Amino acid sequence: MSDTQTIESMVKQPYKYGFKTNVEYDYFPKGLNEDIVNMISDIKEEPDFLREFRLKAYRNWKTMKDPLWANINYPKINYDDIQFYSSPKKKPQLDSLDEVDPEILETYEKLGIPLSEQKMLAGVAVDAVFDSVSVATTFKEKLAEAGVIFCSLSEAVQKYPDLIKEYMGSVVPYNDNFFAAMNSAVFSDGSFCYVPKGVVSPMELSTYFRINNEESGQFERTLIVAEEDSFVSYLEGCTAPMFSKNQLHAAVVELVALDNAQIKYSTVQNWYSGNEKGVGGIFNFVTKRGLCKGDHSKISWTQVETGSAITWKYPSVIMKGDNSTGEFYSVAVTNDKMEADTGTKMIHLGKNTNSTIISKGIAAGESQNSYRGLVKIGPNAKNSRNYSVCDSMLIGDRCGAHTFPYLEAKNNSSSVEHEATTSKIGEDQIFYLQQRGLDEENAVSLIINGFCKEVFKELPMEFAVEAIKLLGIKLEGSVG
Amino acid sequence: MLTIKNLHATVEGEEILKGINLEIKAGEIHAIMGPNGSGKSTLAKIIAGHPSYEVTRGEIIYEGEDLAEMDPDERARKGVFMAFQYPVEIPGVSNSMLMRESYNEIRKEQGLDPLDPLEFEDYITEKLNLVEMDAKFLERNVNAGFSGGEKKRNEILQMAVLNPRLSLLDETDSGLDIDALRIVSEGINKLSGKENAVMLVTHYQRILNYITPDYVHVLVNGQIQKSGGKELAIKLEEHGYEWVTAKTEVNGEAK
């Protein structure tokens, strides 16, 4: 077996989250029209402002077209064939885990995300979103003592409508883009987090997304608001069963940081990516954006993207406040027939704003891995700085890595630095490490982990361990 | 320790080694000299198991075992070490981390417990002096941003850490200034002893001013054309490689 073949065999690892849970679903018709939007709003007993928000979004969406500019190829999606809302039949009772369908609890146990608080990792609160609905949120009381609100978005709509009205759509408007407009019309649930002035969240918050229903799309929204002088670290994990059909995931995440506030948002995305022939897998079209609204605020995105058949995702930061900071740290791994077009937008509006982009793309198999990033420095963003590094690594010779950096600087006092490299995981590197006694599998894993180190060190400890393991599963194994 | 018999090898179909015979015993230092393209670096890479080369005939016996049966990492764990002519960079992996992983692999092979980072730090600190390297080197990424001389010293540091039975030094002297050459040579001298052997591949005689070989072999066109003691290297320095090649051709005509 040649070296190239051996390396390629390492990337062929079974997807271990591919099981399906048998739960009953409430019936919901397929397709998208005003009736569907109204039905969702009815089920959720929403206030009028939200129904209006959905309808406006729907009407805009109808006039929009699928974005085709990204470096990805997928069959035209038939939106009439998608079920835009899906909910497990047993209505989740959010105050008690006893009310949650035991099948669903077991699912999260199997995924390594136990929802009973005795078993939880101390220091991480979880909101579990199963298909479209939040099924459980842990550690709510403890968070409430600190004044932190952490609950499902549906609950927040009922309990804190003023906050929702003020902030939802303030960063990603209902008509922002095709998929964001679709999400705004039909979003089912999601997580809401509010950290009041001066509060440092006493624990990491996390949302664990699970798609289970073959026919449905998943359309959740996350909204995080950090008031003045507050801090929150938020984690997001995602898995889905293996189906031969593709499922659509179109999410929206909005972050708002006021003066001196800091939000750290970390994602490990491991949606099912389809089989090695490219059959099945999640189409992941996500709009994530943070607004540094206040001076000296900071928003930091860290993502480890290892799944999905198609990824279309650009977590961005608008630095409106003076002296605010935006960061984007990304590892994107593609193999088999996966295609990822991911990156960020750093929009500098305030003075002395600072952004950092560290992107690491790893392509294996026959996959295509693209980085697409925009750095925009406005006329008033004097003395702003951006530093970007985009590194790509190729494993084998049938995959592709692409970099599309865009830059617009509208003043003279700002500086932008961009570095990019493409390397091939080389026979010479592997031989060097083997000559030092490491077997081929360890050699590859050491090279990959070294390549991603700058990103992994940004992840919270437990997540970093998880991410390294996940990359291990994706990129090593059956050698020989 | 090492017996090479009638070794033929090709890279991309082209024959580079055309019947090498060589015997290296414990405690010996062998210098392999020859002009560019003669196959001397290839010989070192083949002993280490580089996947680009194919052995077409002959055998390499190391400590009584046929190396053809072993992957490069297995050879390494059994004490075969190569100091690379062009050490590769491994971004994001610190020098100390690689050396600890590497040393622990070799300890595992020997049935010893792995060293934890603190124990390893004590162990490596004493080795640093040998190549006059600062501890700062350990935290830098493997060969990333190292000067040519630093890379070569780093190779000898690894040799010191791993304590191999057979060291293959592939043009370790090339690109070194006088001071670095002295440091590297002294390091190699301190590391050689009765239990281990060194095969030194070099183009120039000057490193042999510092390291005294027991045998010198001149490799031309994929074959060892001449073997002798250290005086052979001096003769080569005076007459150049043409002296050996010219003689070979004369012999050829005489046949």
Image (spheres, grey):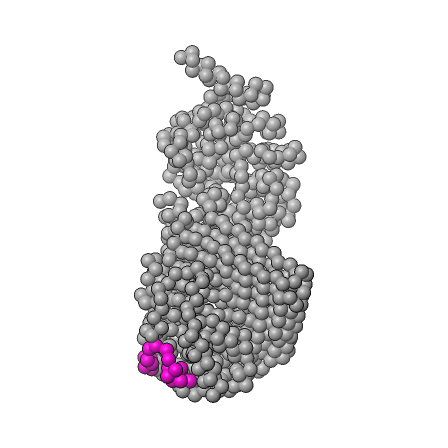
Above or below B244: residue A276:
below
Q: Quadrant of residue A383?
A: bottom right
Residue nearer the viewer, A209 or A367: A367
Asked whether the viewer can see residue B160, the reply is no
The residue lying at 55 percent from left, 27 percent from top is: B213
Residue nearer the viewer, A41 or B157: A41
Residue nearer the viewer, A474 or B82: A474
Instruction: Indicate whether residue A415 is drawn in magenta.
Output: no
Question: For the view shown, which residue lies furthest in the top direction?
Answer: B254
Picture coordinates of residue B243 (x, y %)? 52, 18
**Position of residue B54 in the picture relative to residue A415 (left or right):** left
Above or below B224: residue A248:
below
Above or below A200: residue A470:
above
Asked whether the viewer can see residue A369, the reply is yes
The residue lying at 43 percent from left, 53 percent from top is: A400
Picture coordinates of residue B197 (x, y %)? 51, 32
Which residues are drawn in magenta?
A: A23-41
The residue lying at 48 percent from left, 56 percent from top is: A361
The residue lying at 53 percent from left, 70 percent from top is: A289
Picture coordinates of residue A275 (x, y %)? 34, 60
Question: For the view shown, which residue lies furthest in the front direction?
Answer: A63
